[in-house]
Image (tube, rainbow, N blue to C red):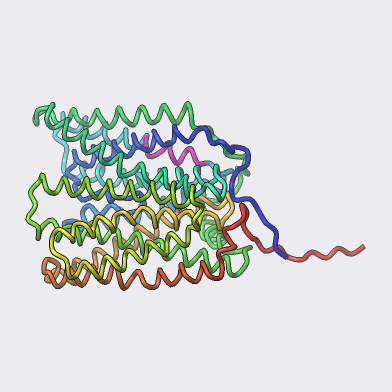
Amino acid sequence: MVIRKPTGDKKHPDFYQEPYLIITTVLYTASLTVSNDLLSRHSCEPFIPFGECLVGVHKWPISTALRHLISLAVALIAGVWSDSHGRKRTPLIFLPIISQILTDGLFFGMSYWEWLWYNYDILGWIIPAIYVGRHIFWVGVMSYVSENSTVESRTLKHGIIIATYPISSLMGSGLVALLKIGIPYRYRHFQFLVPMLLNFIALSIVNSNVKNISDSCNREILWQRPKYVLKEFTNLFKDKLKSSAVILAILIICQSILVTRIGCDYDLIMSYVIHSFMWRDAGEVCFTILKMMAIFLGTVLSVSVLSHKMKINDLLISISVCCFYIIAAVCYIFSNQFFKILLITIIYLCHGTVVTIISSLTSKLVTIEQLGRLNAIQMCMNSLMTFSVVTTYQFAFEPIHYTEAGHLCLFSILYAILTLPILSVFVILYSKYKHVWQNDTIAEKQYKIYVIS
C-alpha cells in the first residue's frame, strides 16, 4: 500500500520571508568574498554555492584534507540535528554568520599583535572548518526554502536563491576593489570591519524577519550518537517505493558528479585558459564577470521562463542542458580563441540551471522532515568528491596539465564523456518516471496492519 505525504509546508504558502532570506544570502556571500580576498584566498570560492573551496590544495594538501574531514563530519551532524529537533533551520543560518563575524574580528585584532604562525592556522583553517562556513548556511537556507514551497514552485525558489550567489560574489569583488582604492595598504586590516558590518546587518535581518517554523521535539533523543546519525541517513532511502529510493540515490550521485565537474572546471580548466590566453588582471576580471553573469542569466531564465512560465518539465530542461554540454565540448576542440570563450560562456549558462533542477528534483523525493539530512549529504558528497578528484588530477597529471592536448582531453572528459551517463539518466527518468514529480506529494511505503476483532 502507498500513501502520499506532503513535500511542502502548507502553513506558509506565501512565504513572505523570502525577500529577507535573499538579502541575507547576498550579504553573507558578499562578506565571504571580501574576507577571502583579504586572506588572499583567490581560488577559494567556486561559482555556485554547491561547489567546493579548494584553497590550499596546491601548498598544504594535508591541512586542507583535515579541514575538509572536519567540515564533512560537522555538516552531517548538523543535518541530522536540524531534522531530529523539529526541523530547526534558522540556527543553521545563524551560526555561520556569527562565526564569520568572530573570525573577521579575530583577524582584525591579530593585526595589532605579533601572533605566532599557528594562530593564523587556527583562525584561517580550524575555526572555519568547525562551523563549515557556507556549507551549513546553505543546508539551512535550501532546507528552509524547500519546506516553504510546493512542488510546482520548488524549482523557481531554488533558482532564485542560487542565482543570488554569482551576483553577490560580484558585489563583494567590486567592494574589495573600492576598499583597495580608498584604504591605504598599511591600514588594510580595517577592511575586516566591512564584512563584519555586512554580517551584522544579515544577522539582524534574519533575527527580525525570518520566522522560526520549527516544531517541538523530543529533547531526550540521542541524535549525537554515531550509530543514530548513520541510521538517520539510511532512513532517507527507507519507507519509500523501491523505484523512488533508487531514483533518489541516482540523482544524488549525478549532482555530485556535476558539482565535481564544475569544481574541476574552475580549478583546472580555467587556470589553463587564463594561462594560455596570456591574460593580465583586466582580462581575467572581465572573463570572470562574463562567466558569473552567464550563470546568473542562465539560472534565472531557465527557472522563471522555461520552468515556471512555460511549464516545461524540469527533466526536459536537464536533457537539453546536457545536449548543450556535449555539443559545446565537441565544438571546443576545433575552435579558435574567440569561439572558445563563446563556448565557455554557453557552458556557464548551463551550470546554474542543471544544479538548480537536480537539487529541486531530489528535494521533492523526501519529506520536509528529511530535508536537512538530504542537503547535508549532498554538500558533503560534493565536497569530498571535488577535493579528491582535483587533488588526484594535480598529482597524477601535473606534467600535461598546461599542455593543449591535456587541456582538450580533460575538457572532453568533463563535458562529453561524463555528461553521457547523466543524459541517459535524465532520458530514462523522463520516459518512465516523470509521474513521480507530477503531484505535490511523495510516495511512501506503508506496511499492512491486520486487526483481529
Assign the N terminus to one quadrant of the image.
Answer: bottom right
Residue 91 painted magenta: yes
Task: Answer above or below: position of 337 versus 192.
Answer: below
Residue 195 seen in render: yes
Residue 62 seen in render: no
Secondary structure mostly seen in magenta is: helix
- Image location of residue 227, percent across then percent down: 53, 60
Residue at 33%, 70% (x, y): give it: 418
Range shown magenta = 89-97
Task: Answer above or below: position of 330 versus 307.
Answer: below
Task: Answer above or below: position of 403 versus 112.
Answer: below
Q: Left or right: where does residue 266 sit relative to residue 372? A: left
Residue furthest to the right in view is 453
Q: Left or right: where does residue 174 sit relative to residue 403? A: right
- Image location of residue 48, percent across then percent down: 33, 50
- Image location of residue 38, percent across then percent down: 18, 38
- Answer with the quarter of the image where residue 141 lies: top left
Residue furthest to the front in view is 310
Residue 80 painted magenta: no
Total marks placed: 0
Q: Left or right: where does residue 177 sit relative to residue 6? A: left
Task: Answer above or below: position of 198 versus 239.
Answer: above
Residue at 40%, 69% (x, y): give it: 422
